[in-house]
Amino acid sequence: MSRVAGQARVPVLTIDGPSGSGKGTIARQVADRLGWHLLDSGALYRLVAVDAERKAVALDDDEGLARLAAHLDVEFAISADGSEQILLEGSDVTGAVRSEEAGIGASGVAVIPAVREALLGRQRAFRQAPGLVADGRDMGTQVFADADLKVFLTASADERAKRRYKQLKDKGIDVSLAAVSRDIVDRDRRDSERSVAPLKPAEDARILDSSGKPIEEVTQTVLDWVSNI
Ligand code: C5P
């Protein structure tokens, strides 16, 4: 491992990609297998949207939203049954954070430069030994531009919509495939076209198309790449 100013440099693997590409699942599996920390950066943008709703901060109040982002009092925990638990100021907001509304709200607050700036330090603080797997949209391009391995995970829009639809149905949420498809296409457009930290592969990213591939195969490909860094 390389050393910076006498300190061991903590390795980072970034996994970026569009909604529904499977990056959350793959990042979690890879982090578990390596025994590394995990940063789900999308959850932070979702939390800003959820906090704004709770505190009645308008989604066009850039300063108010940046203030929320800077002061988020959040804890990521694992509950007794092994499922994730997200606590905002001590209350369980896991369901709200994972909702479609929070995803849409997140992509709205994510275009505000002051919000992104306010979340930068918090994201970088996740880089702790023995290593970090960071998943998001700009992990390899902005937040961890010096990452040891950058993966850009894609899948066809059709397949991503079907996966998202199944996830929502499994959670008992009543949606149509057409509505989920529309949301995915809208969110992709907003994430890719924004001027600040748009969704795009880093120049040195390895592109991995997960269409039609089982999770285990994609996870293994990433682990093989990690073992060569
Ligand atoms: O990945 P997830 O669906 O949780 O992300 C929600 C939204 O947060 C994305 O659509 C995107 O607009 C924003 N986001 C971002 N940068 C990240 C992670 C998420 O802009 N690193």
Image (spheres, rainbow, N blue to C red):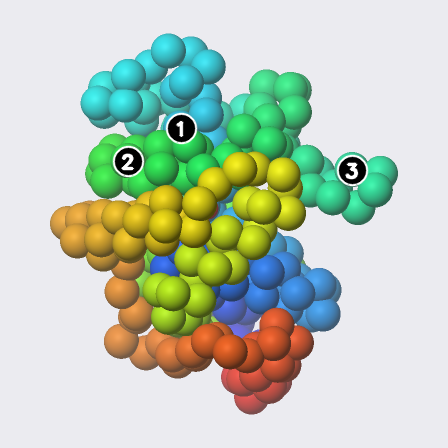
Percent of width and height locating residue 42: 45, 46
Q: Find out if the beta carbon at label 3 lies less than 8 Å from the nearest ligand 1 atom.
A: no
- Mark 2 C-beta to ligand 1 under 8 Å: yes
Residue corresponding to mark 3? 79
* Label 2 – label 1 distance at C-alpha: 8 Å
- Specify which label sits upstream in the sequence, 3 or 2: 3
Question: For this view, does 92 lie left or right of residue 178?
Answer: right
Q: CA distance from mark 1 to mark 3?
A: 23 Å
Can you identify the residue that label 2 sits on? 108
Residue 92, percent across and down?
A: 65, 25
So how many labels did they put on this image? 3
Label 1 beta carbon less than 8 Å to ligand 1: no
**Residue 140 at least partly seen:** no
Does residue 82 appear anywhere in the picture?
Answer: yes
CB-based contact (under 8 Å), mark 2 and mark 1: yes
Residue toward you, 216 or 129:
216
Between residue 211 and residue 63, name the one nearer to us.
211
Residue that numbered label 1 is attached to: 49
Q: Dots 3 and 2: beta carbons under 8 Å?
A: no
* Real-space CA distance between mark 3 and mark 2, rounded to the nearest whole angstrom: 30 Å
Disc 1 marks a residue whose amino acid type is Ala
Q: Residue 209 sits in which quadrant? A: bottom left
Q: Is residue 11 above or below residue 180?
A: below
